[in-house]
Amino acid sequence: MNDRRPSSEPEEPTRPAESRLRPVSPQTVSDQVAEQLRRLITSGEYKPGDRIPAERELAIRLGVGRPAVREALRELKAQGLLVAGRGAQGTTVASLHSPSFAPSLTHALGQGAERIIELMEVRSAVEIEAAGLAARRATLEDLHRLSILVTNTTDMLTPDEDVAFHAAIAEATHNPLFERVIQEPVGLLHDHMAAILDAYYKDPGGAVALQQQHDAIRQAIRSGDETKARHAMRHHLDHVARGLAQLVGVGRVVRLVFIDLDGTLLSGPRLISDRAKRTVANVREGGVEVVLVSSRPPRDIRPFHQQLRLMTPVIACGGALLWNEQARAGLAHTPVDPELAAEVVALGRQMGAVANLESDDEWFTDRLGNLERDGIVDYEVSDPQGIGTVDEVLRSSEAIDKVFLDLRELEDDDAMAATAAIRRAFGRQATIYETIPGVLDIFSPEASKAAMAQQLARRMQIPAEQTMAIGDHDSDATLLRWAGIGVAMGNATPAAKAAADVITSSNLRDGAAEALEHYLLGQGTSGARVSVPKPSLVAD
């Protein structure tokens, strides 16, 4: 039996660079091992392509355990200094050794689950743009490489294939800096989160979903559609971030919730269910603020604000007005340009519409017909401030939060023609929604529920990541996309569902209350911690 002592007879001859390796103290062992190897690489004593001694031999030479060496090698690979080979090739010095942000990135990263959020934010910032550039610049060779990497969307995806796919997109940008910048966060994620990623790939349907998302990105790049490629990459990375966060049990602290009214919180024209009232009260007791959001003016939101005993401002007129309900005063406006408002009113009248204006909490109309009177009764809204005074308001200096044109008195064909004409004339100068059939709401192009929600969140010093939004309409889509967690109702429009992270039940089944109960309640007193499921696990 050969009983030689490994420490006295190394298996390979000693090279000059290896003679400089010295035993280290037992404190922060892996860091000291990594630092010694890093010095040898940066000094040029280990040159690109040189093979690093085997893990066992390094442990003997340095007088440390193999786990410390393994961790040091993992760190250097993540920094792009070493490349892991296969079989006899072993680990070699990277051939593209150049200044890198990896050392500072590694030290700046948080611990444990925080790393996932941080790394995925970096990846999103870089890879979404890379996908767009790849769609513009990819050659036939690049497209062939991507096709090989996405052969069957029903196959399970392996970690190596995942890394190779993203590396191929980086290469298709034909910008070597993108290749470098994308490589490092991906490497760090796979090196530091190997066990979590392994569980993620083995999750039923998880790896298959990733393959399908990869294929969607590939097809967008192949078609040369930059916008579609960026959207597909964003969807993919958001999906991965949510899935990994769920696996490690990390979630976001929600401190502020924006809830739309019609089609969302309300189960009828003027009904908030008892369940919804209890749920909102419990959410507020848990330290989460609730803000009502609507295309309605403040006076039409007021009854629900009072029923829920809220103290927060309301976002009214589709995001054009932030209103302090206690002071009965506007806090912020994004008004329609006066000249544009006058042009909209003129064309609307020409097409037979009844012109209306909203300014602060006041309604001005050309005339009040039977349908308007019925609406006042059905929705329990106030009478207009002025009848026949629209032109007077247009000539004044009052901020016009919304113009709305009532086409309901027209025949169906005439109403459709009027709608088309107004959208054609002003679609590029204003935001136009039909929140009530036959009534067109016209806002400033800068006004949106998302923009005003962001303004309020900043006033409250709450980042977007700590917000939730619940909505159902196209006008809610940007809000759902902006919020840390966007929840679409089961009865939501396709655009709202596409913008959301999760989908709840319909408003007739108390979907808003259901979402608040499921994701927020019972999770603490200074905000609720919520883990958002992967979209593939959420029912439509």
Image (cartoon, helix red, strand yellow):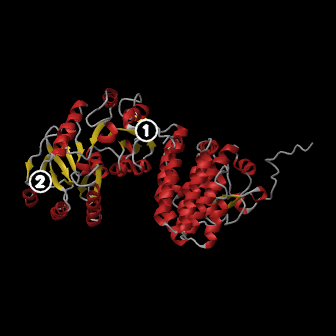
Foreground disc of the pair 1, 2: 2
Where residue 289 sits, quadrant-wise, is top left
| Residue visible at 42% across and 37% down in the picture | 505
Residue identified by numbered label 1: 504
Task: Give residue 197's position: percent from left, percent from top.
Answer: 60, 45
| Residue type, mark 1 in image | Thr
In the image, is residue 358 above or below residue 307? below
C-alpha separation, residue under disc 1 versus residue under disc 2: 40 Å
Residue 78: numbered disc: none
| Residue visible at 20% across and 62% down in the picture | 351
| Residue type, mark 2 in image | Asp
Task: Give residue 360's position: percent from left, percent from top.
Answer: 15, 48
Please name whichever residue, 130 or 378, is drawn nearer the observer in this view of the structure. 378
Q: Earlier in the sequence, mark 1 or mark 2?
A: 2
Residue identified by numbered label 2: 366
Query: Tag 1: Cα neighbours inside 10 Å, few (<14), some, or many (≥20)?
Result: many
